Image (spheres, rainbow, N blue to C red):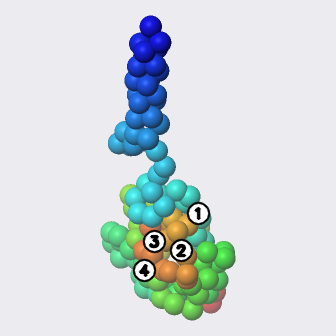
Amino acid sequence: MTLKVVGVGFALALVGASVAIAAPPAGKGKPPTTGAGCKPMVAVILNGTLAADAGSAPVSLSVNVSSGNHFAAAWKNHAVPVALASSTKVNRQGDKNAADLKSGDKVKIHARSCKADLANNAMPSLTATRVTAHPASA
C-alpha cells in the first residue's frame, strides 16, 4: 500500500513540475520590449518647423526639430522624417487635412515609440498620432 502512495505522489510531482516549467501559449506571456506590440510605449513630442509642403497626399513629413519632451532629445536640431498613418489626426487652424500643411508651419507632433527603442539616444522611425500646426509668423 505504501508503495502505491509513493508511486502516485511521485507521478503527481512530475506532472506539477512539467506544468510549472512549461512555456506560455503563443500570444500569452510578456509582450516584447521592442518592435511591434511592444510594452511600455511612451509618448514622443516633437516641436519644430515643417521643412517642406506636405503635398496632395502626404505619407510623411520632414520636420526641423527645435524642442520636445525628454524622449525627443536625440532629434533636437535635426531634420526628422515622420510618417503619417490614416489614423493620424491633423489640425491646422481648423483644417483637418494633412495636405493643408505648408512649409515653415510651426508643428507639434505627437508620436508613440517603444521605450527600449529610445535607449542610448537612438532615433527610431516615428509615426505621428497627432499633428498640430500653426502658420509661420509673417
User: SS at mark 3?
Assistant: strand
The image's mark for residue 134 is none
Image mark count = 4
* Callout 3 touching callout 2 (CB < 8 Å): no
Viewer-side label of 3, 1: 1
Q: CA distance from mark 3 to mark 1?
A: 12 Å
First in sequence, mark 3 or 2: give its number.
2
Q: Amino acid at mark 3?
A: Leu
Give the amino acid type for the residue marked by disc 1 in the picture.
Val
CA–CA distance in space, label 4 to label 2: 16 Å
**In the rendering, at what x and y percent does residue 74 appear?**
56, 84
Label 1, label 2: how far apart the Cα atoms are: 9 Å
Return the residue at label 2: 118
Q: Which mark is residue 42?
A: 1
The residue where tag 4 is placed is 81
**Can the viewer see residue 110?**
no
Query: Identity of the amino acid at label 2?
Result: Leu
Dot 4: few (<14), some (14–19), or many (≥20) neighbours within 10 Å? some
- Callout 1: SS: strand
| Among numbered discs 4 and 2, the one appearing first in the sequence | 4
Q: Are marks 3 and 1 in contact (CB under 8 Å)?
A: no
Q: Earlier in the sequence, mark 3 or mark 1?
A: 1
Query: Which quadrant of the figure contains the C terminus?
Result: bottom right
